[in-house]
């Protein structure tokens, strides 16, 4: 029951965050369009996250299994001692990164965005210097999220992005028109501080207290450092990959970065609405089973999670591909964002959408390896995927421009997922893979049927001259086709007896009986 309530709460909060994210992007394109101001603002706001991503990824994936292990096999006091040492180290590293960033801002921008010239470069330089201190807040945030995830306080951690979204929306609507971009970025910096403050009540509720502690001799700190090495290398390589993509994108036509950013954000939001929720939900569970050395339950949870994430992501992928233009137009097609911008962004979204299902597979398998304190497997496969992505990006951008960057990203994600799955087969021996493959085959059949039905419904609505020029009619149109086709998809999963459907059906029946 608690798991069900947590899941529902996470869905509500995550959807709220996603909606606010779309509002944020819509306000950005409405106020700034696909202009140099938009490129400068978007780049600057994302800059601290890009620089900090290596450290942030390391924190979120090393902290939870170690903190959970301490709580299960030692005590909460020892777990909190470890957390405080960890936080202090992260804050120190964050401060060093801020100082380096402030000194070498210009050089970093020239590397990450070589296409930025003149006023675009000068504006970006000023904005980045203002926003850089937010990296200190980011370090604290990632640590707090790790602590709360270990306590399975997943609803509040799902709200992580909400203060930042609200600060950007507020800044662009109320500050930008009169004060400009510099003051707007100051408001965004304040939004990062709000993210930190948001977690404090829940931390106090779970008996966490901060103390200044720098005991490097702590054995779990040493283990964390051992895990961090391979993971940091893997994430740094991924950041180099992002850097190459951004550098290549900055050489395309003006506004290309904005279109790529919007398509990528929409794609990630589509995945995060459901898929990433499952990943967040299972990570503390997998960490618990790993700490208890319950490999049978661990293996079954991994396979069940893969079944569920693939079953959920297939229809979402189909809807994203089918309605790519309508979705972009509905969310961003107004203000300074022209019809040409909508078409361009929708084309990019098509190629990004191919990776949605594989994002889920990668994240589930990565969390499984992290829970086992194995960071080398993910590093190895991540490096291979990044190298493939960079090579493909350099080749495809010549013939496909921005579409080539998106397609390269999707192909590399597919390869990473396949490599991780291959390693999983060698690692987990208590798994019925024949049954798993059969389930995937059934899910694909249901997905093909859903796509065919969407084409039929679309042609029927066109035949009766359904007018989708207004936003309300467009939203109704997308909703009708998506709901009907998804219902048929679910019905086919039930008819084909895909694993997990019977379980969900029984849960719903029991819930209805209790309500009556």
Image (cartoon, rainbow, N blue to C red):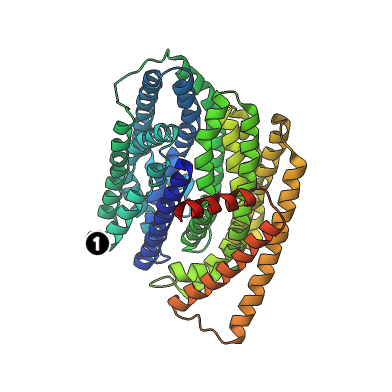
Dividing the picture into quadrants, the one containing residue 238 is top right
- Vertical side of 460 occupied by 21: above or below: above
Query: Can you give x and y, in whole percent of width and height, for residue 482 in the image?
Result: 56, 68
Would residue 207 be found to the left or right of residue 414 on screen? left
Would residue 478 be found to the left or right of residue 354 on screen? left
Q: Is residue 11 visible?
A: yes
Q: Nearer the viewer, residue 508 or 12?
A: 508
Most extreme residue toward the right, as rendered?
434
Q: Is residue 250 visible?
A: no
Query: Can you give x and y, in whole percent of width and height, for residue 131 in the image?
Result: 32, 45
Crowd band around label 1 with a 10 angstrom C-alpha radius: few (<14), some (14–19), many (20+) = few
Which residue is located at x 26 percent, y 51 percent? 187
Would residue 329 be found to the left or right of residue 159 on screen? right
- Which element carries disc 1, helix, strand or loop? helix
Which residue is located at x 65 percent, y 47 percent? 307
Which residue is located at x 37 percent, y 34 percent? 144
- Vertical side of 248 occupied by 36: above or below: below
Which residue is located at x 60 percent, y 54 percent? 313
- Vertical side of 439 occupied by 151: above or below: above
Q: Which residue has dot 1 on it? A: 174
Query: Can you give x and y, in whole percent of width and height, for residue 410 in the image?
Result: 63, 52
């Amino acid at each position: 029951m608690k798991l069900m309530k947590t899941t529902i709460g996470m869905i509500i909060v995550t959807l709220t965050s996603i909606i606010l994210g779309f509002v944020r992007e819509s306000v950005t394109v409405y106020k700034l369009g696909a202009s140099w101001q938009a490129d400068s603002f978007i780049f600057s706001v994302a800059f601290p996250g890009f620089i900090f991503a290596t450290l942030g990824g390391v924190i979120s994936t090393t902290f939870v299994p170690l903190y959970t292990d301490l709580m299960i096999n030692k005590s909460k006091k020892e777990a909190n001692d470890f957390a405080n040492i960890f936080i202090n180290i992260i804050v120190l590293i964050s401060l060093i990164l801020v100082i380096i960033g402030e000194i070498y801002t210009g050089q970093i921008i020239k590397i990450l965005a070589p296409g930025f010239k003149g006023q675009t470069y000068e504006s970006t330089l000023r904005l980045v210097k203002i926003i850089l201190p937010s990296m200190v807040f980011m370090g604290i945030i990632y640590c707090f999220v790790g602590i709360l995830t270990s306590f399975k306080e997943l609803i509040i951690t799902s709200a992580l992005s909400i203060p930042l979204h609200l600060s950007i929306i507020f800044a662009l609507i109320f500050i930008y028109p009169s004060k400009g971009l510099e003051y707007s970025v100051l408001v965004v910096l304040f939004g990062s501080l709000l993210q930190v403050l948001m977690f404090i009540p829940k931390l106090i509720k779970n008996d966490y207290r901060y103390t200044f502690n720098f005991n490097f001799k702590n054995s779990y700190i040493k283990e964390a450092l051992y895990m961090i090495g391979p993971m940091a290398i893997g994430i740094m390589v991924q950041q180099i990959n992002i850097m190459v993509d951004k550098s290549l994108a900055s050489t395309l036509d003006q506004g290309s970065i904005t279109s790529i950013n919007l398509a990528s954000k929409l794609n990630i939001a589509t995945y995060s609405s459901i898929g990433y929720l499952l990943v967040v939900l299972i990570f503390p569970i997998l960490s618990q089973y790993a700490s208890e050395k319950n490999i049978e339950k661990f293996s079954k949870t991994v396979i069940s999670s893969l079944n569920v994430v693939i079953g959920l992501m297939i229809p979402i992928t189909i809807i994203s591909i089918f309605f790519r233009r309508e979705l972009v137009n509905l969310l961003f097609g107004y203000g300074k964002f022209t019809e040409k911008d909508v078409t361009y962004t929708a084309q990019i979204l098509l190629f990004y959408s191919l990776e949605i299902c594989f994002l889920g597979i990668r994240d589930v398998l990565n969390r499984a390896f992290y829970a086992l304190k194995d960071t080398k497997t993910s590093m190895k496969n991540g490096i291979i995927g990044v190298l493939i992505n960079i090579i493909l990006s350099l080749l495809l951008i010549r013939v496909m421009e921005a579409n080539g960057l998106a397609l390269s990203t999707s192909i590399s994600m597919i390869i990473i997922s396949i490599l991780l799955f291959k390693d999983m087969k060698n690692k987990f021996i208590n798994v019925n893979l024949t049954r798993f493959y059969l389930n995937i085959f059934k899910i694909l059949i249901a997905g093909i049927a859903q796509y065919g039905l969407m084409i039929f419904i679309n042609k029927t609505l066109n035949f009766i001259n359904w007018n989708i020029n207004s936003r309300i009619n467009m939203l109704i149109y997308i909703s009708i086709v998506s709901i009907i086709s998804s219902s048929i998809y679910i019905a086919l999963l039930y008819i084909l007896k895909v694993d997990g459907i019977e379980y969900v059906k029984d849960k719903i029946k029991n819930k209805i009986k209790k309500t009556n």
